[in-house]
Image (cartoon, rainbow, N blue to C red):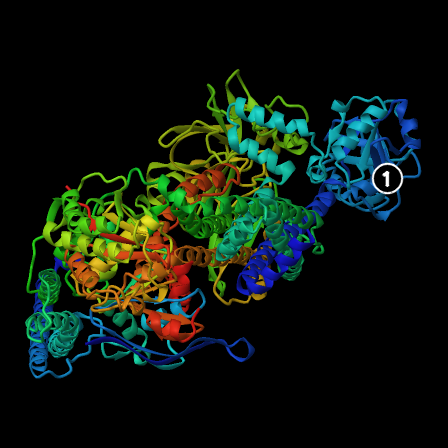
Amino acid sequence: MEWMWAENTGPVIVVCAVMAAVICAAAALFFYREKNRIYRMACKMMDELLDDKAVTPSGLKEGEAAVLSGKAERIQEKLRAEIGQAAGEKEQVKSLISNMSHQLKTPLANIMMYEEILSADGKGGKSLSEEERKHFLDKMHVQSEKVNWILNSLFKMVKLEENAIVFEAGPGLIRKTLLDAVNLVYEKAQKKQIEIGTEYFPDCLLYHNPKWTTEVFANILENAVKYTPEYGKITIGMRRMEMYTEIWIRDTGRGIDKGELNSIFKRFYRSPDVENVEGSGIGLYLGKLILEKEKGYMNVASVKGEGSCFSVFLQNCRN
Amino acid sequence: MKVLEVQNVEKIYGSGENKVHALRDVSFDVELGEFSAIVGASGSGKSTLLNLIGGLDVPTKGKVVVRGHDVAKLNRKELTIFRRRNIGFVFQNYSLMPVLNVYDNVALPVTFDKGKYVDHEYIRDLLTELGLWEKRKNYPNELSGGQQQRVALARALANKPALILADEPTGNLDSHTTIEVMGLLKASSKKYNQTILMVTHNEAIAQTCDRTIRIEDGKLYDGELEFYTRGGE
Amino acid sequence: MKNSIRLAFAYLKYYKKQTLALFLGIVLSASLLTGIGSLLDSGRTASQENAREKYGDWHYSLRCDYPWYSDFQEHTKGKGYEVEKAGVLTVRKIIEEPFEIKLCYADAGYMTLMGRQLEAGHYPRENNEAAADTYTLKNLQIEAEPGARFELDGEEFILSGIISDMPDSEGMQVFVNEGLDYGTNGKFLYLKFDESRRVYRQMVNFANTFQTDKTSIYMNDKVARYAGGEAKAALWETVKSGISMEGTGFPYIWAVLNMYWNLTEKAVLAALGLFGIFIIYSLFQVSVIKRMSQYSIMQVTGLGEGATFGILAAELGMIFLAGYPAGCLLGNGVAALLYQKAGKIFVQPEDFIVHSGAAKEQAAQMMNMPDPGAFHFSRSVAAGGAAFLFLVLLFLAWILVRKMRKMTARELLAKDSGKRKNRKIYSTKTQSLTGVLTRKFMFARKGAFAGVLISLSAGSLIFLGTAYVTENTRINNELKFKADDGLGSDMQVLEDSDVLSDVMPEDTAARLRDIKGIKSAYAVRYMPGEISLPDGMLKWTSYYPEIAVEEGFDPDPVLMEKYNGIAVQTGEDDYKLKVNIYGYDDGMLEEMNEYLLEGSIDPEKMRKENTVILKTLMGGQGTYEGISLSLGDSIQLKTPVNTEVSQEVLKFLAEENQYREKNFKISALASRPLAKVDTYIGDDGTNRVDIIMTNEQMKENFGVEGYQTMSIRLEEGADAEHVSAEIQKVTSGIRKCIVKDYTQQIETQNLFLARKMLFFYGVALILLVISLLHIMNSMQYLVTARKHEFGIMRAMGITDAGFRKMLVKEGLRYGIYSSLVMAAAYLVLQKFLYYFIIHVYLYLHPKASLPAFPILLMAAVNIGICIAAVLISGQAVLKEQIIEEIRE
């Protein structure tokens, strides 16, 4: 190296400086052009997005531009999905209306029948005794209640499905929620001489909304009472896990067919076996919707003829 | 909006006398946000189907289209990037990197994308959602099976893929943990509007899904009723 | 057992690639081991044969004029011993003047043992007849012609026959008739035992059988050491004295053990064996890991550990049965070819390089270097190697079975290291996790990491070590070649005379330089002298037989007779030493720089300040501390007053006026002289002290004008024969002046050295190639072991390019780390080797280290190979189905 500094210092420094300058300039040019390229590409992508054309370059390339275009594709899809969803919703509303009319048909027909009977009172010579009239009025009342309940349920369901209702879920003690639900069906159970018992059930904080969750339990319990013959038994229990707590409700009812297990949580699904039993086909579906909002879920295990066990899973509250 | 379209897919392994028809004329679609289960006995061809959809294998006949990409038409590199950006895998054996801690395991697939910034907010959210935030600095071998599978799930979600393919995600877990992992799968499918396709042989697990696709002997039956009415066991 | 073999065979067939790799590994190891074993063995046998010729074909001798002798004649074969050949020498009389000469009668057995044949005439038949060899006759100044008459100890003899030269072990002998008897007989029995057994044991049994004292039995150790002539207990003695005796230490132990046990050879073979095992182990390990899952399945189905071991052992055994013979054949085939072409390089050098370029009759012998004899297949190495390798293979199988047990509890193992884990989250800090992964993969298991690094650096380490030794061997050979063998010059003109006044006149040099074809002619002036070393300045008093008190270490009778010995004791710690004084030309002094130990050589300064170069003694351990004279010290030099003095004066016992004394300051110390004169007190390059100065100083100080020798170097392509004739013309008139042409010899020697180097480098290269194979294999193992993880990464969407990039990074890391380990280990090894070649192998002026280039080159090769290896095995990973990898 010494020779460099001895005599030839001048030219060497000049050469070095020139080289450094050239390299710097080349680098600057490169980065400028690169920036421009990316900008133009992003711009083009936006246009394609706006025109609903296929985004270029393909999102299946390596590199920064491809990552961007991949994201753009996702945005495009989201837009398309939303459009598709809107169309689907229209379809849904249609089917909902037809379903609703179907559901309301029976109680309404009943009401109309009772109303006819009552209004015909005394006209055709035949008059109803006070007792009879009371009976029909009661029946009419029950049917009106039912219509009311169905409409309420439908209303809730629709709102829930459309995300129109946002209920707040938070840590809450579960025992109270469950007790409220049991109280709602207690009378009916009493009537059928069905015993409702609980196993180990410590109170604990679970992530849920008491009002809506009461509805979930009530629906399950109602079904249990409905499909359990007289002198049957309903047992409620709880199991704590790392993230979830399972609340299970076991009955000694008719059980569910294996092929149907997947369908009972569907909207308006009615098992062909229970066509003559009253029911709307909304309860479990509604329960499922509510639980989804609470980051929980439910499933069922059943043996035909021996009974079913519905489990509700709610997230533990972590401190 | 269809995320996945499987059209008349056939898969044949081997040739001549050793020919095995893993799948015969399988067709179905999966909608955005749907949580479907593919059930069937072992050897029925359900894992083969999952591998085809995940781009880990190519069909002999037919088309697998994920988000508009025909998987069979992609070259090796495109297929890899396609997998990275569109498919999240959850395997039965968790398949975590033993040398990385939970957080890095989750972030790993994101870092494969050059130039992509890592959305640490999102990862934090994921880990909290899956109850793993406290464990983020632990290594896989310090976690229980359920926790490991939750990490795997977080990893699958990290890239916001179009489709999560879960191959017997609860196969190695006891019934407790199975319930939890399933719950979280469901919860995250709802929360992130994520499409999930899960393979399992466990009927009880399948019923928690929106939809059950049954495969027996390489043939597909969409829904339980169809299977039973068509003379299934 | 049968099942195991069947299963093992099935595996071998199924895993063809692994089987082939293993087979190759065994073939290579076996061929290297047995081939080199056979080469060394053949070389040793040749050395043994050469030693027989030089020292006589016998192992022990003892006095036998005892009653048991007749008993022995009837029982040459007895309990625990078998005498193959025996001979008796009867010493009739020993005369002291002018030399120590034995008048003896020898039987035919003795003559064959000593390899002495009748060259002319006949053995003595009458009492006044005698036979002798030319050497003795020359010393006695008797004409070597049958019928010559001469007088010995006042008795007259007629020379009846000429006998071929005696072996080195015996002194001067004159053979006389059996009937001649002076009444003082000493009968000596010479024995050659059956060499298929250790001769030492036979000797002991022999001594026990005939009730003789075995300590009085003399061993011909140069020959007997090849046949196990030394007591085993003596080895322990060696070690003990090596530790306890001052000035011996490790080099002494090594040297002695090497002499009797061929330690170097054994070490080389052991190293090769170890190397082979290492290779086989790592090859097999990969093969086993590939199918670990199958073993675990089999274990689940009830295959016991014993049966697993059986299968592994059967597998290895089968490959071994096929591979070892093939390796033997290959190795010995190549070795035989090599031996045929260049067998000489394997024969031990000290037994054939004759270090006396000036001796006329021996110079001719140098032309045909040692006889390498025929190549022979070393059964002992082959059998020993087979047994050793087989045992090791069994051991390997056992280790692998044990390892398998651990592997099944892999998770358990992983948990162990969980305590001191780094809790850092990397993805928040760094863009790419692949680098982190690479690092973590490497350090996850520290033991394995260290193992891989060591194995990676082992190959290049061996290569570098070999290169270092080879380079120094080359330097040493060249230096010794020039100094000790006197082959530094193409031709030599010398005065074959021990009379100081016999010199070449000064102008001869100038006339020689004028001859066409001569590049340079260095003239050398000579004068014998004596230096005094008072007050313990001579440290190695046991160096010279004249002053050493050691049985059987006798001074040369000729030197005693002519010069009163080399060393003379004058007081308790005072000695005088005969020295050679040389005057060199400036050109030759320049070349002396290669042999410089201390100080500097500057002819101008030497002339101006009248300083000299001291060529000191070299000890048996390559040290130069025999005389405590250092730079700047002055020496008192006593020389004859002029060149015309009588022979007697050279004994340095004459009157003081025959001598002059002068003091010289030492300006440099050297290890060897370049041109030597050994017609006076002799000079083999190591055993004499020389004082070297300029020719001008010789003239000024001692009045020496003529030249004793001239070293002539020819120009490139000059016609040696023609030049030789021209030189003859110039020197024809000079008394006792002869011309020696070394060109042929130099050519042979150069060829020989080149071949030797080639062989060394060849072996080093083979080792390197094998270790490269091993590196490839280890890296492949590393990659294979992590196939599961790689499968995950691929499923997660790492592209092939990204994957390769990650692997390259890893390969680079391994390459760099292993290069660092290699460099560090090499520095240690180099220190060790340096010590060894100086103190044990007595190399001249070895370099302390290799230049940086080969080390850097090896590092680059290491890195390159690591990268190539990971890429190749990475390719295998990419080829496999992702799903398969994940399920593993």
Amino acid at dot 1: Gly
Up-down: is C482 above or below C879? above
The residue located at (51%, 40%) in the rendering is C842
Residue C141: x and y in percent read: 74, 40
Q: Quadrant of residue C603?
A: top left
Q: Which residue is mark 1?
A: C109
Residue C827: x and y in percent read: 38, 43
Up-down: is C343 above or below C356? below
Asked whether the viewer can see residue C168, the reply is yes
Q: Nearer the viewer, residue C808 or C57?
A: C808
Label 1: chain? C
Q: Quadrant of residue C631?
A: top left
Asked whether the viewer can see residue C873, the reply is no
Q: Secondary structure at mark 1?
A: helix
Residue A211: x and y in percent read: 10, 52
Q: Quadrant of residue A111?
A: bottom left
Query: Which residue in the rendered view is the most extreme toward the top?
Result: C572
Residue C522: x and y in percent read: 47, 52
**On the picture, is C629 further left or further right than A39?**
right
